[in-house]
Amino acid sequence: MTDTLVLDAADRLFADQATPVLVNAAESGEWPRALWQVTEEAGFLDALGEGADFAGIVDAVAVLRAAGRHAVPLPLAETMLARFALAAAALPIPAGPLTMAPVEVEDMLSLQRAADGWHLSGVVRGVPWSREAKSIVVLADGMAASVAPTQAAIQRAANLAGEPRDTLSFDGPLAADAVAKLPKALDRELLHSLGALCRAAQMAGALEAALGLATQYAGDRVQFGRPIGKFQAIQQQLAQFAEQVAAATVAVTGSAEMVAAGGDLFFAAAIAKIRAGEAAGRSSDIAHQVHGAIGFTHEHRLHHLTRRLWSWRDEFGVESEWSIALGRRVAAQGAEAFWPALTA
């Protein structure tokens, strides 16, 4: 199945199921059980694939772009990543929504051998959807562990979009069969990069939808006897908006194709997250300028997209962090490696 077919299938499903009413209800704390069920039945949770390769990354990015277009209030990226990590560590994969921890690079957890298994300790912030997850896939000390949410002290919080982003405190035992070593090639840094590429895909989808809303509104809204889209200033704004969306989408899809072909995941994730983050900042401003006050109202769909863009921009590394990390990586490789890395 090509990424276009996957994108179309996911887009149709989410357009039908992820209505603005459902999104508003989810932001108020109601778990969208029916939406999760149809998404699971569609097989989208396994789009990333299982094991240590990235053969499914192009299809996964397509699904996440579609989810971003419709502000789908589900832990799709988190479940894909968790299932991928569990499969790589040869641990059982539970049914239902999953999440991963840590999300922030500077947060660290400790897994130490105990008499009858393992002991997990530490505090992690901004963990997505932990209160709805059937299991939290913890990464620590080169290991992966499947941990029940009841084994963590959960301090509830949410991002700007109303999505659960909790602080979790661990300090307790884990059974021996709940922990396994990750393959050497699949460390925490690599999984963090994969998470950044997934978030960038969601951002690309949200940007596409926001552009569509702004373009439609500019054609419908009449001022001084003609649609505001006929005014040169609005046309210039929409052209800049379209430029940003196109650049972000190409960066994300190109990065996914690069990874699927065996390219450097860190480099691809950095490019995608940096470009999507930059586009999110510039495009959200234009979207709300074109819409005026109506774009902020509870009834309008635009804020579902822009609040997620502002939130996702900070998750799995903001673009300034990725820019610094990418610069250091390129500098460490030396001048002779710069051009081949840029053109590969």
Image (cartoon, grey):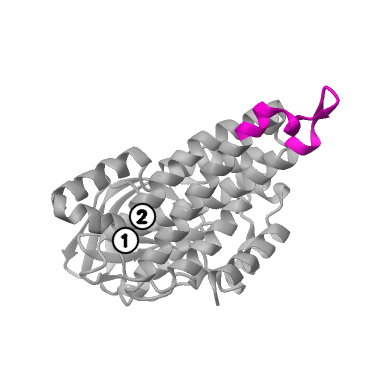
Q: Are marks 1 and 2 in contact (CB under 8 Å)?
A: yes
Position of residue 323 measured from the top left corner of the image (x, y, whole percent): 30, 42
- The boundaries of the magenta stretch are 218-237
Q: Which residue type carries mark 1? A: Leu
- Residue 54, visible in the rendered structure: yes
Position of residue 3 measured from the top left corner of the image (x, y, whole percent): 54, 69
Q: Which residue type carries mark 2? A: Ala
Label 2, secondary structure: give it: helix
Q: Is residue 153 left or right of residue 306?
A: left
Q: Quadrant of residue 83?
A: bottom left
In depth, the one of 338 and 31 nearer the eye is 338
Position of the N terminus by quadrant? bottom right
Q: Which residue is mark 1?
A: 265
Q: Quadrant of residue 344?
A: bottom left
In depth, the one of 205 and 246 nearer the eye is 246
Q: Main secondary structure of the magenta part?
A: helix
Q: Which residue is mark 2?
A: 269
- Residue found at x 61% / y 73%: 41
Q: Is residue 315 left or right of residue 214?
A: left
- Residue found at x 73% / y 34%: 229
Distance Cα–Cα, label 1 vs label 2: 6 Å
Circle 1 packing at 10 Å, graded few (<14), some (14-19), many (20+), is many
- Residue 154, visible in the rendered structure: no
